[in-house]
Image (tube, rainbow, N blue to C red):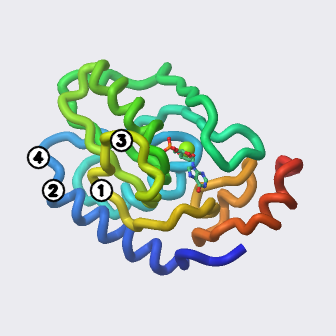
Amino acid sequence: MRTLLAAADIRREVERLGSRIDREFPEGPLVIVGVLTGCVLFLADLVRAISRPVRIALIQASSYRGGATRPGELRFDLDGLPSLQNLPVLLLDDIFDTGRTLSTLRTELLARGATSVQTVVLLWKSARREVELLPDHYAFEIPDEFVVGYGLDYNDHFRNLPEIAVLEPCDIEAFRASPPS
Ligand code: IMP
Ligand code: MG
């Protein structure tokens, strides 16, 4: 594995992103909807870098299945979301890859009555975009490589790494068949 972004760089950029959201997001209540599971570390750090009051909601979504590093069918579960009627929403995920997850979820949240849905991600793999949507806020633009750490996983491994690392083909081979025990 090769380090792409050190923990200190992530901390600095997440704090910068929090201040920018504080300045640029419309006045009033701020509801952040995080996409599980990859969002958890980024969400926890970003909300502490935002000084205005924030409400947090979570949705479950997945598009990578098991040992694949390319997206499969998108599944999501919006049960348990609080009412978003007449509220501006910030939809947060770990990474904007093809953009299909955020584009689909954004449409769903607008259909549930959110007045606006801006998107925020830690990482933007810009070369892979397959939708019209662009992320409204992001911390790092990265090349088209499979990355893990700081919430991102491969086959459920590596979410607790404090840095972002690139998985080399030999790492992918080593962890393909084995979910963490
Ligand atoms: P998208 O719908 O193609 O934008 O994919 C978004 C989802 O795919 C993210 O929420 C991640 O869970 C996952 N994903 C995309 N690229 C990577 C990666 O490089 N490492 C780990 N997960 C990834
Ligand atoms: Mg995800």
Tell me the SS state at disc 1: strand
* Nearest the eye: 13 or 27: 13
Which disc, if any, is residue 137?
1
Q: In percent of the image, x 37 and y 40: which residue is there? A: 131
Q: Are marks 3 and 4 in contact (CB under 8 Å)?
A: no
Q: Nearer the viewer, mark 3 or mark 4?
A: 3
Q: Is residue 56 left or right of residue 26?
A: right
Q: In percent of the image, x 37 and y 72: which residue is there? A: 13
Q: Is mark 4 within 8 Å of ligand 1?
A: no
Tell me the SS state at disc 4: loop
Sequence order check, earlier mark of 1 and 3: 3
Three-letter amino acid code of the residue under disc 2: Glu
Vertical relation: 14 (above or below) 53: below
The residue that mark 4 highlights is 27
Vertical relation: 10 (above or below) 180: below
Q: In percent of the image, x 31 and y 64: which residue is there? A: 17
Sequence order check, earlier mark of 1 and 4: 4
Determine the CA span between mark 4 and mark 2: 9 Å
Determine the CA span between mark 2 and mark 1: 10 Å
Sequence order check, earlier mark of 2 and 1: 2
Q: Residues within 10 Å of mark 4 (few under 14, many from 20)?
A: few
Q: Residues within 10 Å of mark 2 (few under 14, many from 20)?
A: few
Tell me the SS state at disc 3: strand
Determine the CA span between mark 1 and mark 3: 10 Å
Q: Residue 72: x, y in percent?
A: 63, 35
Q: Quadrant of ligand 2?
A: top right
Q: In percent of the image, x 34 and y 32: which residue is there? A: 106
Sequence order check, earlier mark of 3 and 4: 4
Which disc, if any, is residue 91?
3
Q: Please indicate, yes or no, whether residue 18 appears anywhere in the rendered image.
A: yes
Determine the CA span between mark 3 and mark 2: 15 Å
